[in-house]
């Protein structure tokens, strides 16, 4: 306003002034007026440019309101879209849409070409990875999950975003990623509160009574009926003998009167494990709310490794049925399994690894039935698998404890001052996996816990023979992909007889040709090829080491063993695979009264391959003292030589 008034004043001065004394004065005033107008125009131009720049900046600025709220709350906020069509017209909307398309195209092109994670500060990176994790291209999905997992610089709210926005397949892939951050997973859904004195075993009984009683082992059927009939108080009052769960042998048994409620739950869960091996029963378990019930028991029994292990075993069996995967994920089991995978205890982590592998249909082609455990690799890996190593324990051994490092003597530990962290709970998983990372290492376990139960089962005479176990294990191993790659068998004690029986049976079945043709070698640890003196000792000693039905076949020069050995030698000479046998030279102490040489040197001699005597007893023949011990180094040397071409 002041500039305009000044110009008018100058014009009036020109028009009303008297005779000019000098002709150039009016032009000077006009020049001053022009300068004012020029200043005004420049000011207006500056204001206009500033306004346009601020408007453009506002258009290009990312609205972080939802992000700021996301940092405070664990929700995904979606901006509501207006239904007014007038807001989607005009140059402002068009410019915004074109800029958004251009930026998105650049980022997607960079992701496809460079195959590397985006700048972690860029908010679009997270959502683009989530979109890629749902791509129809399997390789793109796997790469996206890998980039999500390995990026350790996500913000806290971004982990929550992934947990809520990712699909089922991505969540499972993240759970099977090494060193994954548990913030990627939603916690299990909240369950209705119950009273502190509410007996949880009653719910287990209700679940068991709703399941069919067909298609399960007769002994399990008997004990299921017993669990349904008796109360925890009655069982505690009986204070009956020893009960074993998990097939880990007498040292791991506990009395029925120790923790009545926990024992009853274990009792019911053991029966439920057998039900979960039947596909139609798994449907019933899911339909009756079994997944939620197991989740409640799992959370309540965090102090019981046995209960938790049996529950995860049930989940692993149910995961064999792909139709149940969505129900398992919705029940919150992915986050639980991801946490257990980080457990320092090999048994716990291996059970969780099996369950997740059965859920992960995107990266795993094989399925792992009950009793088949992958020791390596337990996570998703870009390392190609070149061959398989299969460990088979004795009939009353275990998939993990049989293959542990030799137990240390307390006095020797003090002298050596070695920490417990150096001790290997399972040397195939810790030692062999690090020396031969291109191998898939599998350990099998059969249902020996029924043979361990001291209580008399009405159908106890019905025992599973070696022939029955051979057919059962062959079907499981075939489902796990055994035979698709070069294979080495590693066996201890009567597990070696089972391996021989499986190979002889497979050679007679055309459907098992791959297992036969891909067998490259076998390692026998004190296998009684020609029988054992064990059968000559008392019934207690026999029950301590082997099931009663198989003890008869352990008699020295048993016709059954001789027939099996002859058939195997004929088969082995035809296939020409490598054989390495270790033989014990020291007697084994059984309790405080019995000292027994379980497998003499002559019985451990198969007749083909190398035989190496070792100064250890029967139990320690498969348990090296340390990684550089002779026993392990010879085993490793055999594996590397036999698989030299593959490795």
Image: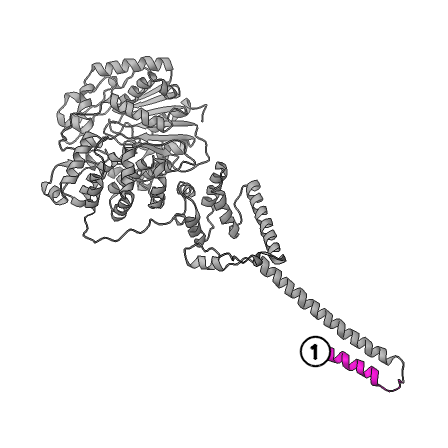
- Residue 309 visible to an observer of this rendering: no
Which quadrant of the rendered structure holds the C terminus? top left
In the image, is residue 47 above or below residue 210? below
In the image, is residue 289 above or below residue 4? above
Across and down, in percent, residue 565 comes to 27, 15
In depth, the one of 229 and 107 nearer the eye is 229
Number of on-image labels: 1
Specify the farthest residue to the bottom: 18
Colouring method of the image: one colour
Is 199 left or right of 5, judged from the image as shown? left
State the extent of the magenta-drawn residues as a range: 2-20
Across and down, in percent, residue 50 comes to 65, 65
Where on the picture, by quarter, is residue 430?
top left
SS under mark 1:
loop
Which quadrant of the rendered structure holds the N terminus? bottom right
- Residue 615 visible to an observer of this rendering: yes
Q: What residue is shown at x 15% (from left), y 20% (from top)?
A: 536
In the image, is residue 487 above or below residue 154? above
Across and down, in percent, residue 292 comes to 29, 45
Badge 1: how crowded within 10 Å, few (<14), some, or many (20+)?
Answer: few
**Magenta stretch contains residue 14:** yes
Q: Which residue is mark 1?
A: 1
In depth, the one of 431 and 61 nearer the eye is 61
In the image, is residue 364 above or below residue 568? below
**Magenta stretch contains residue 479:** no
Across and down, in percent, residue 78 comes to 47, 55
Dominant SS type (magenta): helix
Is 69 left or right of 505, judged from the image as shown? right
Is 131 left or right of 187, judged from the image as shown? right
């Amino acid at each position: 306003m002041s500039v305009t008034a000044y110009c008018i004043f100058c014009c009036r001065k020109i028009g009303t002034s008297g005779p000019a004394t000098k002709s150039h004065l009016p032009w000077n005033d006009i020049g001053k007026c022009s300068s004012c107008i020029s200043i005004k125009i420049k000011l207006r131009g500056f204001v206009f440019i500033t306004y346009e720049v601020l408007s453009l900046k506002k258009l290009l600025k990312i609205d972080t309101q939802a992000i700021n709220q996301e940092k405070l709350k664990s929700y995904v906020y979606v901006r509501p879209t207006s239904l007014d069509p007038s807001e989607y017209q005009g140059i402002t909307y068009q410019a915004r849409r074109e800029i958004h398309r251009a930026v998105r195209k650049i980022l997607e092109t960079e992701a496809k070409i460079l195959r590397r994670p985006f700048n972690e500060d860029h908010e679009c990176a997270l959502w683009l990875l989530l979109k890629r994790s749902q791509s129809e291209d399997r390789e793109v999905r796997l790469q996206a999950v890998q980039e999500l997992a390995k990026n350790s610089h996500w913000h806290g709210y971004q982990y929550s975003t992934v947990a809520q926005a990712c699909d089922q397949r991505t969540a499972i892939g993240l759970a099977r990623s090494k060193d994954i951050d548990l913030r990627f997973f939603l916690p299990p859904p909240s369950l209705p509160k119950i009273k502190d004195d509410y007996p949880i075993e009653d719910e287990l009984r209700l679940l068991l009574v709703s399941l069919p009683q067909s298609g399960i082992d007769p002994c399990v059927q008997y004990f299921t009926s017993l669990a349904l009939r008796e109360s925890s108080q009655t069982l505690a009052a009986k204070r009956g003998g020893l009960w074993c769960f998990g097939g880990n042998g007498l040292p791991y048994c506990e009395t029925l009167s120790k923790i009545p409620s926990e024992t009853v739950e274990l009792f019911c869960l053991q029966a439920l494990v057998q039900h979960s091996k039947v596909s139609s029963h798994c449907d019933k378990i899911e339909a009756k709310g079994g997944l939620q019930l197991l989740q409640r028991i799992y959370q309540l029994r965090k102090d019981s490794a046995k209960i938790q292990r049996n529950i995860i075993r049930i989940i692993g069996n149910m995961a064999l049925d792909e139709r149940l995967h969505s129900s398992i994920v919705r029940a919150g089991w992915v986050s639980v399994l991801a946490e257990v995978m980080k457990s320092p205890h090999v048994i716990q982590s291996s059970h969780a690894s099996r369950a997740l592998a059965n859920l992960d249909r995107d990266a795993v082609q094989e399925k792992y039935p009950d009793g088949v455990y992958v020791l390596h690799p337990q996570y998703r890996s870009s390392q190609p698998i070149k061959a398989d190593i299969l460990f088979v324990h004795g009939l009353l051994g275990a998939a993990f404890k049989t293959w542990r490092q030799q137990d240390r003597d307390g006095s020797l530990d003090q002298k050596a001052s070695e920490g417990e962290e150096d001790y290997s709970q399972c040397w195939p998983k810790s030692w062999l996996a690090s020396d031969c990372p291109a191998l898939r290492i599998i350990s099998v376990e059969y249902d020996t816990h029924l043979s361990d139960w001291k209580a008399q089962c009405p159908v106890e005479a019905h025992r599973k023979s070696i022939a029955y176990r051979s057919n059962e294990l062959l079907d499981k191993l075939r489902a796990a992909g055994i035979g698709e790659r070069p294979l080495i068998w590693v066996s201890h004690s009567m597990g070696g007889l089972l391996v021989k029986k499986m190979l002889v049976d497979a050679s007679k079945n055309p459907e098992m040709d791959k297992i036969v043709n891909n067998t490259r070698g076998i390692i026998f640890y004190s296998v009684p090829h020609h029988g054992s003196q064990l059968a000559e000792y008392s019934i207690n000693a026999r029950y301590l080491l082997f099931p009663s039905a198989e003890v008869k076949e352990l008699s020295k020069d048993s016709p059954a063993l001789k027939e099996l050995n002859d058939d195997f030698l004929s088969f082995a000479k035809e296939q020409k695979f490598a054989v390495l046998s270790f033989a014990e030279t020291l007697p084994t102490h059984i309790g405080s009264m019995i000292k027994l040489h379980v497998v003499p040197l002559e019985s451990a001699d198969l007749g083909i391959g190398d035989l190496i005597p070792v100064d250890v007893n029967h139990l320690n023949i498969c348990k090296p003292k340390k990684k550089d011990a002779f026993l392990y180094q010879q085993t490793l040397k055999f594996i590397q030589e036999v698989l030299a071409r593959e490795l």
